[in-house]
Image (cartoon, rainbow, N blue to C red):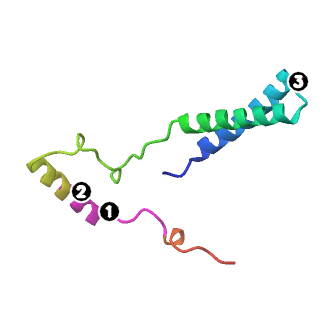
Amino acid sequence: MPRPTAAQLAYGSATVIVSTIAMLLLSQTSTGLGVAVISAAALALGLLVALTVPVPRRRGRHAARTAADAPTGSAASAASAAEAAQDARVPDPRPASAEHPVHH
């Protein structure tokens, strides 16, 4: 299972907090059972929201291709040869400082 994104964590957490407060204020419950039911419902709602937040798709030349997107036959070999030639010419865009952490 992929790790949740920052947006999923933020939307899910905000949903749990806001829905818990809203349901407690609207229900005016003071029993432990009522608070437990409302808390469980808010957690379920937060999980639902976090899972339905659209996940950004990877873009760029390193993105995984599906079978429908991949070229077939001689076009596939020509495309892979062109990508290999371009990879050989293009230097890594990251600076050297990005590869090694700085310790103070």
- Say which label, 1 or 2, has the lower sequence index: 2
Callout 2, which amino acid?
A: Glu
Q: CA distance from mark 1 to mark 2?
A: 10 Å
Q: Which residue, given by chain and number where applicable, does mark 3 sit on?
A: 28
* Image x and y of residue 79, in percent: 18, 51
For this orientation, the residue located farthest to the bottom is: 104
What residue sits 43% from the left and 43% below the top?
Answer: 57
Q: Is residue 56 magenta?
A: no
Circle 3 crowding by C-alpha within 10 Å: few under 14, some 14–19, many from 20: few
Q: In terms of secondary structure, where does tag 3 sit?
A: loop
Which badge, 2 or 3, comes first in the chain's sequence?
A: 3
Answer yes or no: is residue 63 visible.
yes
Snapshot quadrant of residue 67: top left
Marks 1 and 3 in Cβ contact (< 8 Å): no
Looking at the picture, tell me which residue is in the foreground, 16 or 80: 16
Q: Which residue is mark 1?
A: 90
User: Crowdedness of circle 2 by 10 Å Cα count: few (<14), some, many (20+)?
Assistant: few
Vertical placement of residue 39 versus 58, above or below: above
Percent across and percent down for residue 41 are 70, 32
- Left or right: residue 27 versus residue 42 is right
Amino acid tagged 3: Gln
Q: In the picture, residue 43 is in which quadrant? A: top right
Q: Is residue 91 magenta?
A: yes
Q: Quadrant of the C terminus?
A: bottom right
Number of the front mark, 1 or 3:
3
